[in-house]
């Protein structure tokens, strides 16, 4: 299993700090969860049904005519590679590591590419995988460029797979509405924007035939009844959407300024996190962890991802810890 953020229980054991004493900034998840609606007993007692309104609410939210709910976009990341025979897959890297791993496990030949290498290799690829905004760097690619890549792939029956897990905060930059095009697949994650990663819900946006093949691969009742009710309520709460967009943007901008004030200028980020490249990334990670602040460390690239603090007290602890670090590392 690959390493991921959110490993708070391990940090509790390793640093002997009680759970309530941690500021967990290790995951790029909005720290303000949407309200949980009342879940009727029938949702627990009956098998889930697919005509309860979830798909319609999600289609309206994403601006598409068809989609497939999945148990978190991770389920699609693992299943989609099984829908194609073995081929050549490019993964724009660094990015969420499960993408390259999923295609390798399914027997595909995977080449991890930088952005400036894509044009050179594109004609030799069967599939190109892009995370936009990127995780962990926060880098965004223009919709026009993505659609140009898709057009070249589609001419040969190829796919462009775009993981938009962090796109809900900036929906105007999404290519979701273009997924009627053959060979264009967009993944959307529910948990990050809505702050409810524990419910395990995501959506695949693509042409109908591909969605049917994926649904057959995943099998019936992929989404639990309670999750379907919760997801629909959150997707329809438009006032809460605007509030979440606003406060995430403000918090991310504040986080960038907080890091800069400590002499740690972010190398990237989006409205759900900031990304820092630092030769001493592991040292800063350890320094913060000893003070009960959990970050996401990427050892291979010597970088860190900072999620958004939820409370003013969390901001104060982060600011104080950064000041202490700067004092020890002028």
Image (spheres, rainbow, N blue to C red):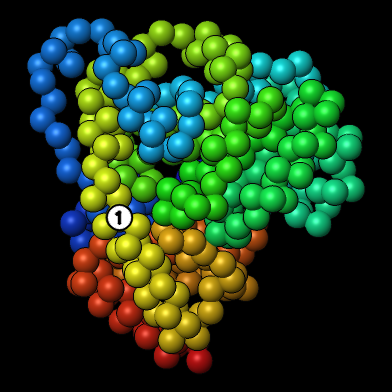
Residue 263 percent coordinates (x, y): 50, 86
Give the SS element for disc 1. Answer: helix
Query: Does residue 217 appear left or right of residue 273 in this picture?
Result: right
Give the answer, above or below, for where 257 lies relative to 239.
below
Name the foreground residue: 222 vs 213: 213
What residue do we see at 34% from left, 68% from top? 251
What residue would you read off at disc 1? 242
Position above or below: 5 against 302 = above
Give the quarter of the image for residue 152: top right
Question: Residue sitting at 43 percent across and 48 percent down?
Answer: 168
Towards the viewer: 297 or 118: 118
Q: Residue at x 33, y 30 (%)?
A: 57
| Horizontal side, residue 98 vs residue 27: left or right | right
Q: Position of residue 232 (x, y in %)?
A: 27, 30
- Give residue 305's position: percent from left, percent from top: 49, 61
Determine whether 13 is above or below 181 in the image: below
Instruction: Report which quarter residue 189 is drawn in.
Output: top left
């Amino acid at each position: 299993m690959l390493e991921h953020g959110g490993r708070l229980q391990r940090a509790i054991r390793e640093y002997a700090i009680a759970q309530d004493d941690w500021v967990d900034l290790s995951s790029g998840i909005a720290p303000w969860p949407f309200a949980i609606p009342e879940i009727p007993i029938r949702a627990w007692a009956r098998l889930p049904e697919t005509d309860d309104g979830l798909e319609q609410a999600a289609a309206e939210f994403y601006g598409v005519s068809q989609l497939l709910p999945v148990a978190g976009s991770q389920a699609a990341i693992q299943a989609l590679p099984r829908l194609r025979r073995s081929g050549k897959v490019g993964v724009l890297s660094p990015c969420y590591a499960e993408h390259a791993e999923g295609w390798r496990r399914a027997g595909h030949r995977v080449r991890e590419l930088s952005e400036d290498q894509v044009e050179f290799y594109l004609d030799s690829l069967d599939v190109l995988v892009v995370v936009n905004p990127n995780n962990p760097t926060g880098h965004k690619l223009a919709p026009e460029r993505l659609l140009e890549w898709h057009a070249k792939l589609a001419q040969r029956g190829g796919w462009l797979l775009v993981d938009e897990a962090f796109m809900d905060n900036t929906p105007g930059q999404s290519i979701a509405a273009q997924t009627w095009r053959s060979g264009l697949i967009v993944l959307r994650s529910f948990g990050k924007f809505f702050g409810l990663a524990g419910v395990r819900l995501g959506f695949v946006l693509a042409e109908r035939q591909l969605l049917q093949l994926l649904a057959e691969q995943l099998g019936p009742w992929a989404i639990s009844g309670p999750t379907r009710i919760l997801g629909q309520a959150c997707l329809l709460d438009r006032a809460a959407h605007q509030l979440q967009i606003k406060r995430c943007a403000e918090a991310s901008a504040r986080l960038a300024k907080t890091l800069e004030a400590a002499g740690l200028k972010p190398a990237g980020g989006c409205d759900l996190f900031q990304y820092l490249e630092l030769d001493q990334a592991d040292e800063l990670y350890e320094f913060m962890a000893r003070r009960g602040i959990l970050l996401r460390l990427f050892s291979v690239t010597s970088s860190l991802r900072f999620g958004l603090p939820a409370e003013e007290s969390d901001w104060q602890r982060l600011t104080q810890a950064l000041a202490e670090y700067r004092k020890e590392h002028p």
